[in-house]
Image (tube, grey):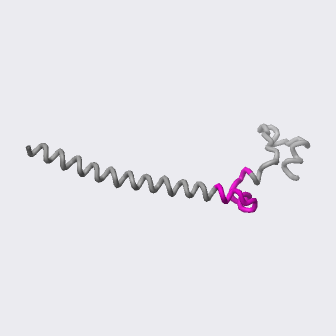
Amino acid sequence: MMRDKASERYVRLFLRFSRRVERMLLRLVIVFVCFLIAAQALLRIPALRELISAVDRLEGKPVMYRSARENNNPSPESQQFLHP
């Protein structure tokens, strides 16, 4: 009898705790979805997009990979990318 009451009390406490945690997680998901929507909306503004996203700033600029030998003695072709 006593064991049934203790287990019943435990189940009630667990259910109360899990409902609170579930509500908190649901609120967090809603907040993060709102942040995601706001961030995507800000990326639609070209002036802000340049500040926020490095991809848009660097788009169209060539990336040159150089060997260690070229670092010490760069070729004339790579000089144009190093010093525009």
Nearer to us in this view, 6 or 83: 6
Using the rendered view, name the quadrant where residue 73 is placed: top right
Residue at the extreme bottom of the image, as rendered: 47
User: Residue 2 at what x, y percent from top left?
Assistant: 9, 46
In the image: residue 36, left or right of residue 59: left
Using the rendered view, name the quadrant where residue 20 is placed: bottom left
| Residue at the image point whose x is 15% and y is 47% from the top | 6
Q: Is residue 45 magenta?
A: yes
User: Is residue 64 shown above or below 17?
Assistant: above
Q: Main secondary structure of the magenta part?
A: helix
- Which portion, as a residue range, is magenta? 40-55
Q: Is residue 25 magenta?
A: no
In the image: residue 1, left or right of residue 62: left
Using the rendered view, name the quadrant where residue 70 is placed: top right
Work out which quarter of the rendered image holds the N terminus and state it: top left
User: Residue 46 at what x, y percent from top left?
Assistant: 75, 59
Nearer to us in this view, 51 or 33: 33
In the image: residue 36, left or right of residue 65: left
| Residue at the image point whose x is 82% and y is 45% from the top | 62
Residue at the extreme right of the image, as rendered: 76
